Image (tube, rainbow, N blue to C red):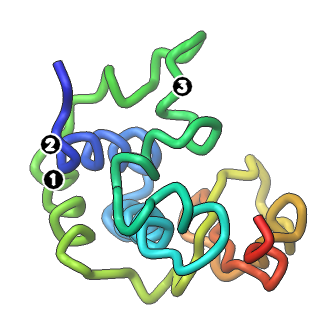
């Protein structure tokens, strides 16, 4: 069964940030939409003018879209109302100011966030819960 973009987004929010509370889930949803609306670089090419599905399913971007040796994936999630509400909130154009224009996030499994996202295409913007959020540097434009 093919999921709608809304359901796919709700499943990704639940899988990537379900344990981070509403603020963490909104932050992750904001990063997804920042990628969808990127004006340059890799994500602009992938989104091809606003394709949220292409951003979510872009290979090697989200652990939760990988199924091999990974039972915690979007296909095994059962989103609840809050996940759909946050997906709708983001799809309606809302963004979390706590992540600004961040395009990247990850859990470093450490109490500190590295200053730069790998390859120095992102610089630390904020930490919310266990996730570090990174705004693009000038180097991102060349991706």
Observer-nearest of 108 and 74: 74
Query: On the image, which quarter does residue 125 sit in?
Result: bottom right
In this picture, residue 137 sits left or right of residue 6: right
Residue 119, x across and y down, in percent: 89, 61
Q: For the residues carrying marks 3 and 2, which lies nearer the camera in this image? A: 3
Q: Which mark is residue 70?
A: none
Q: Which mark is residue 84?
A: 1
The number of discs equals 3
Q: Quadrant of the N terminus?
A: top left
**Residue 91 seen from this side:** yes
Height in image: 122 above or below 73? below
Residue 25, x across and y down, in percent: 37, 60
Residue neighbourhood size for the residue with mark 3, other residues' Cα within 10 Å, grouped as few (<14), some (14–19), many (≥20): some
Which secondary structure, mark 1? helix
Q: Earlier in the sequence, mark 1 or mark 3?
A: 3
Height in image: 109 above or below 93? above
Q: For the residues carrying marks 1 and 2, which lies nearer the camera in this image? A: 1
| Residue drawn at x 10%, y 50% as measured from the top left | 81
Quick check: marks 1 and 2 in contact, CB under 8 Å?
A: yes
In this picture, residue 96 sits left or right of residue 1: right
Quick check: marks 3 and 2 in contact, CB under 8 Å?
A: no
Q: CA distance from mark 3 to mark 2?
A: 21 Å
Q: Mark 2 highlights which residue?
A: 80
Q: Which mark is residue 66?
A: 3
């Amino acid at each position: 069964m093919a999921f709608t973009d809304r359901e796919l987004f709700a499943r990704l929010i639940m899988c990537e940030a379900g344990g981070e509370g509403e603020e963490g889930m909104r932050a992750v949803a904001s990063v997804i939409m920042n990628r969808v609306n990127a004006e340059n670089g890799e994500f602009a090419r992938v989104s091809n003018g606003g394709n949220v599905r292409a951003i979510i399913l872009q290979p090697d971007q989200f652990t939760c879209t990988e199924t091999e040796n990974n039972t915690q994936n979007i296909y095994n999630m059962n989103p609840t109302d809050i996940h759909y509400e946050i997906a709708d909130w983001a799809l309606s154009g809302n963004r979390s100011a706590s992540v600004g224009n961040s395009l990247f996030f990850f859990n470093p499994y450490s109490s500190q966030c590295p200053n730069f996202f790998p390859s120095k295409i992102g610089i630390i913007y904020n930490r919310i819960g266990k996730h570090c959020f990174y705004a693009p540097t000038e180097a991102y434009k060349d991706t």
